[in-house]
Amino acid sequence: MSLVIQSQRRDAFGKNASFRIRRTGKIPAILYGEGRDNVPLVLAKVDIVKILKSESGLNTIFRIAVDGGERDVMIKDLQVNPTTDELLHADLIHVAMDKVLRVDVPVELVGEAVGVKTEGGFLDFMTRELTVECLPAQIPDHLAADVSALRLHQSLKASDVPLPEGLRLITDPNAVIVLVQVPHEEKAPAPVEEVAVEAAAPAEPEVIKKERAEKEPEGEK
């Protein structure tokens, strides 16, 4: 059974109105998509946090109770205060259960690579999400990437990650998911050669030379 969260129509707009909404433990939101009119909403913050903490996270499909009915939706985007991490606003989109969606699914590494376990390497996790297309009901919580057989300098690409039936890979198949790297050794700085430089006698200023020449007796020139 799908998760159903309650909502109410939002009739006040602007920064001050949004501030007042947040003070009550709720957040402003907007629902759009599927050729329908945009619907401004007010949602309980705890409901959105609950969805984000679920296994499917942002890819969770749930139902919104609005205008006496329920609609299948998912989170499209979130606004978060970069300083406090406070949730400020949510964008929701209508979901048609019979139409293909494009979503980003997190990659989960499975196993311990040979190159790490016995060869002294480390895993460089480079691509943490894969973009796929599928029906809403087929969206997986994550995609498993088995790294057990990887040795030093070997990698696992997007095309190597098995996809459940019904999913189509959109990410570049050659995108590197994980690479077994060799740790960089810190080299000691090369010793600096000490070169003895003989101090040269300071050159005699030209003006002094000229004055000395003028003072010397005629016979000494």
Image (cartoon, rainbow, N blue to C red):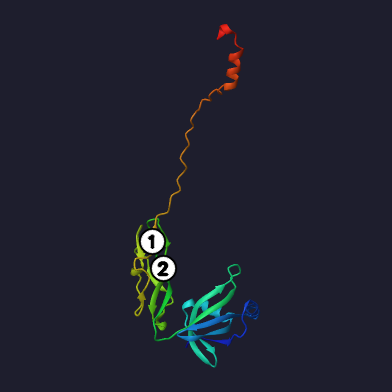
> In the rendered image of this protein, does residue 195 appear above or below residue 152?
above
Q: Position of residue 139 (x, y in %)?
A: 41, 79
> In the rendered image of this protein, does residue 217 appear above or below residue 155?
above
Say which amino acid is labelled 1. Leu
Q: Is residue 209 left or right of residue 73?
A: right
Q: Which sits in the foreground, 140 or 220?
A: 220
Q: Which sits in the foreground, 184 or 9?
A: 9
Q: Position of residue 43 (x, y in %)?
A: 58, 83
Q: Position of residue 81 (x, y in %)?
A: 59, 71
Mark sitting on residue 216? none
Q: Earlier in the sequence, mark 2 or mark 1?
A: 2
Q: Position of residue 50 (x, y in %)?
A: 54, 79
Disc 2 + disc 1, Cβ < 8 Å: no
Q: Is residue 42 left or right of residue 58?
A: right
Residue 117 appears in the figure:
no
Q: Quadrant of the C terminus?
A: top right
Residue at position x 54%, y 81% from top?
30
* Residue positioned most to the bottom: 68
Say which amino acid is labelled 2. Leu
C-alpha span from label 2 to label 1:
12 Å
Residue at position x 63%, y 76% from top?
15
Q: Which residue is mark 2?
A: 109
Quadrant assignment, res 176 = bottom left
Secondary structure type for disc 2: strand
Q: How many numbered marks appear? A: 2
Q: Which residue is mark 1?
A: 179
